Amino acid sequence: MGQQHGTNVAIPVGDVELDGILAIPPDASGVVVFAHGSGSSRHSPRNNFVAEVLRDRGLGTLLFDLLTEREDEVRENRFDVPLLTDRLVAATRWLSDLADAHNLPVGYFGASTGAAAALRAAARDPEGVAAVVSRGGRVDMATDALAAVDVPTLFIVGGADTQVLDLNREASDQLTCEKELHVVDGAGHLFEGPGELEEVADVAADWFEATLA
């Protein structure tokens, strides 16, 4: 699984600070901000693996905690998509103010509930984001925002993750932007089989390379 790589950062949001790991390669073509799923964090081995592949392709990455440790102890907060969306938008604005990232296009990589936050953030701030990739996304939690999403959006879902696949098909049908649904044959929700997470990372990297360039 992926190694942590980058600089530890503290992102001020309202009256809290969110911990993150920022890595921007020289001559980066864009930066991908990760919105993890419930119960996960900037240390997510799956997201770190994907981030490593993106960096190998010349993209910057920001993995950060959407909640503080204390907030994460309250289970309801993990499913408070409006709160997670606010945090993602605020972190994106913080990122765009950094000298290293100032003129770089931003993409979102959202997993599970984080995908709902990514879609809502893209709908709310279309100037701030250039592309979205959802991995096993709970896109049903962003239904009322889908019509306002105007950036290229890729849904990646496991073929054996049947309930989430149905939700993603329905959501994809509602999008009016450039979109694609990529099914990883036989994969479950966590993409734990041989080569499955590698396929997720490669497909996501291809998408970001094409849309953030």
Image (cartoon, grey):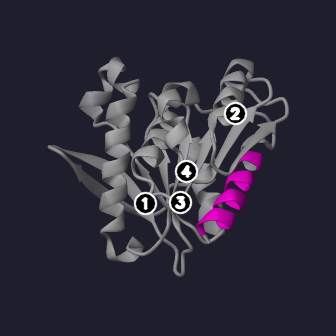
Decide whether residue 206 is among the magenta residues: yes
Q: Is residue 165 above or below residue 175?
A: above
Return the residue at label 2: 173
Q: Is residue 210 above or below residue 12?
A: below
- What is the spatial separation of the Cα atoms under label 1 and label 2, in whole angstroms? 23 Å
Q: Position of residue 53 (x, y in %)?
A: 65, 59
Q: Specify the quadrant that holds the C terminus.
A: bottom right
In percent of the image, x 71 and y 34: which residue is there? 157
The residue type indicated by label 4 comes to: Asp
Q: Do the residues bearing badges 3 and 2 touch, measured as CB atoms within 8 Å?
A: no
Closest to the camera, between mark 3 and mark 4, is 4
Q: Do the residues bearing badges 1 and 2 touch, measured as CB atoms within 8 Å?
A: no
Which sits earlier in the primary sequence, circle 1 or circle 2? 1
The residue type indicated by label 1 comes to: Glu
Q: Position of residue 41 (x, y in %)?
A: 43, 39
In the figure, is residue 166 to the left or right of 79?
Answer: right
Which sits earlier in the primary sequence, circle 3 or circle 4? 3
Camera-side residue: 141 or 206? 141
Which sits earlier in the primary sequence, circle 1 or circle 4? 1
In the figure, is residue 184 to the left or right of 40?
Answer: right
In the figure, is residue 116 to the left or right of 82?
Answer: right
The part of the chain drawn in magenta is 199-212
Return the residue at label 1: 127
In the picture, the disc for residue 150 is: 4
Which sits earlier in the primary sequence, circle 3 or circle 2? 3
Callout 1 secondary element: loop
The residue type indicated by label 2 comes to: Asp
- Pointer 3: residues within 10 angstroms few (<14), some, or many (20+)? many
- What is the spatial separation of the Cα atoms under label 3 and label 2, in whole angstroms? 20 Å
Return the residue at label 3: 130
In percent of the image, x 52 and y 80: which residue is there? 26
